[in-house]
Image (spheres, rainbow, N blue to C red):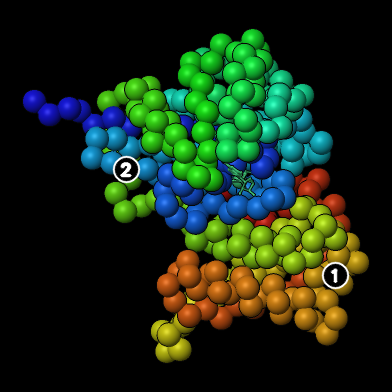
C-alpha cells in the first residue's frame, strides 16, 4: 500500500524583517516574495505552494502582525487573526539576533486565542554564537507552549529541510489543491507592483515612506511588438514625495522604471514596456474605501 498524500495550510507570521520572505524563497526556489531590509514591504498575503511526491504545503506570508497604528494596521491585524484560526499550522518566526521583544509578546497574545498548533522558528542562527541559542529558546518556551521549536537560517538554507519534515508531521491526509508547477496563486499584477515598490524604496532611501502604493492600471500583451505593456501609478501622500520620486529632470523615475522593468522581464520571461507616473492622494491609508480601489486587498 502506498502512503497517502498529505496537504495543509501554514501561516508564516512574525515581525517585519525576521526573514519570512527569505524562507519562502528558499523553500520555493523562486523570487515570488519581495525581500527588503525595510519593514513591511509585503503588504498582501502571498501564497507559496510547495509540492513534493507525498505532500503539498501552502504557505501564507501574512502581513506583519503588529499593534495597529491606523486603519490599514487594524485591517491587517484582523486579517491575520482570522488566518491563524483557518490554517493547519502557524509558523511564528523570530530573529535570533534581536532576541525577545515587546512585539513578540503581542503576537503570543494573539496565538493564545487560537487552537492551531504553533511552531517557533528561530531564524538567522548564522548571526549568533551557539551558546546564545539555548537561553533564547528558554525565554520563548517560558512565554508560550510551542509545539515545535526549529532554529534555522533561511538565508543559508540551514535546517530548512528539517523544518519541512516537522511540518509534514502536522499535516493530515488531503488533496493536491494546486498543480505541481504552480508556486503562487497570486496574479502577476501584485508581484509586479511589489517589484516597483521595492525599487522606489531602495533608490529613494529613507526619503519616501513605506506608505506609498503602486497601482497596476493595465497589463496587456502586445503580440505585434512581442512585448508586455504595463502601466502603473505610484501613489504618494504629499507633493514633496512626488518630487523626490520624479527626481531632477525625471531621472529618479527613469531609474526606478529601468530597474523595475528588468525584474518584470525576468519574471514574465518577455520584453516589457513599462510606463510609470506619480499621483498625490492625501491620507489614503485612512480611507478604507480607497484601499479597495487601489487593489491592496483581494
Ligand atoms: P520579512 O520581512 O520577514 O519577509 O523578512 P525578509 O525575508 O525580507 O528578510 C529581511 C532581511 O533579513 C533581509 O535582508 C534578509 O536577507 C535577511 N535575512 C533573512 N533570513 C536571514 C538569515 O537566516 N540570516 C541572515 N543573516 N539574514 C537573513
Ligand atoms: Mg516579507
Ligand atoms: K494556540
257 sits to left or right of 45: right
Mark 1, residue position = 244
For this orientation, the residue located farthest to the left is: 1
Q: Position of residue 74 (x, y in %)?
A: 73, 34
Residue at x-position 64% and y-position 77%: 258
Task: Count residues near mark 1 (Cα–Cα under 10 Å), then give few for <14, some for 14-19, many for 20+.
Answer: some
Task: Name the one closer to the observer, 187 or 196.
Answer: 196
Tag on residue 286?
none
Of the numbered discs 2 and 1, the one sitting upstream in the chain is 2
Location of the N terminus (image quadrant): top left
Disc 2 versus disc 1: distance between alpha carbons? 43 Å
| In the image, residue 206 above or below residue 178 | below
Assign a secondary structure to mark 2. strand
One can see residue 212 in this view: yes
- Is residue 110 shown above or below 94? above
Instruction: Answer with the quarter of the image where residue 73 lies.
Output: top right
* Front one among 131 and 246: 131
Task: Tell me the residue that label 2 is attached to.
Answer: 51
Amino acid at each position: 500500500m502506498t502512503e497517502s498524500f498529505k496537504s495543509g495550510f501554514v501561516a508564516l507570521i512574525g515581525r517585519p524583517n525576521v526573514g519570512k520572505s527569505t524562507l519562502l524563497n528558499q523553500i520555493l526556489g523562486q523570487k515570488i516574495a519581495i525581500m527588503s531590509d525595510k519593514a513591511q514591504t509585503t503588504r498582501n498575503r502571498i501564497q507559496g505552494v510547495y509540492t513534493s511526491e507525498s505532500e503539498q504545503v501552502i504557505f501564507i506570508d501574512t502581513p506583519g502582525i503588529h499593534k495597529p497604528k491606523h486603519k490599514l494596521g487594524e485591517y491587517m491585524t484582523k486579517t491575520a487573526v482570522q488566518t491563524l484560526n483557518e490554517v493547519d499550522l502557524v509558523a511564528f518566526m523570530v530573529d535570533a539576533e534581536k532576541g525577545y521583544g515587546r512585539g513578540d509578546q503581542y503576537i503570543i497574545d494573539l496565538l493564545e486565542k487560537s487552537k492551531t498548533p504553533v511552531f517557533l522558528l528561530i531564524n538567522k542562527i548564522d548571526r549568533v554564537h551557539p551558546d546564545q541559542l539555548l537561553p533564547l529558546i528558554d525565554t520563548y518556551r517560558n512565554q508560550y507552549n510551542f509545539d515545535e521549536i526549529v532554529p534555522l537560517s533561511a538565508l543559508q538554507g540551514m535546517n530548512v529541510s528539517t523544518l519541512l519534515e516537522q511540518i509534514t508531521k502536522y499535516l493530515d491526509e488531503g488533496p493536491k489543491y494546486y498543480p505541481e508547477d504552480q508556486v503562487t496563486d497570486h496574479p502577476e499584477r501584485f508581484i509586479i507592483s511589489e517589484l516597483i515598490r521595492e525599487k522606489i524604496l531602495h533608490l529613494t532611501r529613507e526619503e519616501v515612506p513605506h506608505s506609498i502604493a503602486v497601482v497596476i492600471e493595465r497589463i496587456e500583451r502586445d503580440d505585434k511588438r512581442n512585448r508586455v505593456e504595463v502601466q502603473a501609478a505610484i501613489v504618494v501622500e504629499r507633493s514633496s514625495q512626488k518630487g523626490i520620486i520624479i527626481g531632477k529632470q525625471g531621472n529618479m523615475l527613469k531609474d526606478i522604471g529601468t530597474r523595475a522593468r528588468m525584474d518584470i522581464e525576468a519574471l514574465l520571461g518577455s520584453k516589457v514596456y513599462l510606463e510609470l507616473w506619480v499621483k498625490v492622494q492625501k491620507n489614503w491609508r485612512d480611507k478604507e474605501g480607497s484601499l479597495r480601489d487601489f487593489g491592496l486587498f483581494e
